[in-house]
Image: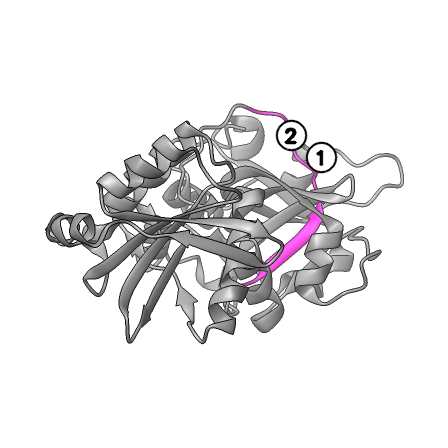
Amino acid sequence: MNFTDGRYSEALTTQQETWLLELHPDGMARFWGATPSHDKKMQGVATGDVVLFTGENRVRAVGEVGAVFRNRDLADRLWPPSEDGKSWHTVYSVLDLTDAAIPYADLNMAIGYKSAHNFPGQMVLTDEKARSVLEEFMITPGTEWSRRSRDVVPPADEQTRHATRTAALEEQRTRQTSYSRSKRLIIVNRHESSLVREFRQQLLAEGRAAGRFYCPGGISDLYVTDDNGAELIEAKSNSGHRYVREALGQLLDYAPHSPQGADRLSALFPDRPAAEDIALLHRYGVDCVHRVAPGLFARVPAPRGCRDRMRQMWSA
């Protein structure tokens, strides 16, 4: 919605409007709210935190918190309360929003809750639980926002302590409006993230710890450094030709930015690609790794000569 419209702007304080315009320069934003009963839970929520919107037994969308403040007048204009209904006096904007389809069962497993647990209202996760959710589903807050946030300071009376990383969960409640995504927040395809989690377990069993790294082109799926050098791994949810080409393109894009010069590039698939697609990967010195059974993966390594020739290009 356009918060500069008089119907809404007249309900904002000068500080709140300034803050919103810092975060949403075009005057357009999505807004969500919380009732007074959730005040204590909302105290730790701050700009840049990740928010999961739930409903129909799944996480339906993921976003980042923008401006967060209390303003009952604005809330009542956004969501007019029914007769004897509650006002949604805490209001927060969303910096970015992307669709998701994470079942409650998977979310509960990541948090350590019983599989039948539901999420009927506001709940804030901090520290290890929040980190588990972000890592489990490969949810990455936008690097652009992380840089900009140092220059955008909320009004003194709005400042809150920022937890390590907070995931606030609530049922989706929004006004329908057109909205242009900033593409700052990244959430990996559910099937890809499941494949990565499964392969990471095999790496751990081999004594190989995997992380990720940022680069101008995006974020790696897996990045392993050990006595064998640095390996960059890109996962795809399908082994079809289009997905093989996507994995190859991303690997070649990310490789020159490897924190440690890349010694091996690998494309990870849920099953074995066609022979001609494996040959395509090998032509560029890229290994093919594919799932052969639950928790078990096979590697089809690129010819050593191809890898050695291409390594100079990876590190260019």
Disc 1 to disc 2, C-alpha distance: 8 Å
Q: Amino acid type of disc 2?
A: Arg
Q: Position of residue 33 (x, y in %)?
A: 66, 45
The residue at the point 18 percent across, 62 percent down is: 261
Residue identified by numbered label 1: 79
Magenta stretch bounds: 165-177
SS type, badge 1? loop
Q: Is residue 216 visible?
A: no
Please state if 148 lies on the left or on the right of 91 as rendered.
left
Secondary structure at badge 2 equals loop
Q: From the viewer's perspective, is the residue at label 1 or at label 2 nearer? A: 2
Query: For residue 35: magenta?
Result: no
C-beta proximity under 8 Å, tags 1 and 2: yes
- Packing grade of label 2 (10 A; few <14, some 14-19, many >=20) is few
Q: Judge from the rendering whether residue 292 lies leftward or rightward of residue 54; answer left or right.
A: left
Rendered view: 200 above or below 96 = below
x and y, in percent, of residue 157 in the image: 50, 62
Q: Nearer the viewer, residue 143 or 221?
A: 221
x 33%, y 59%: residue: 213
In the rendered view, would you say 138 is above or below 30? below
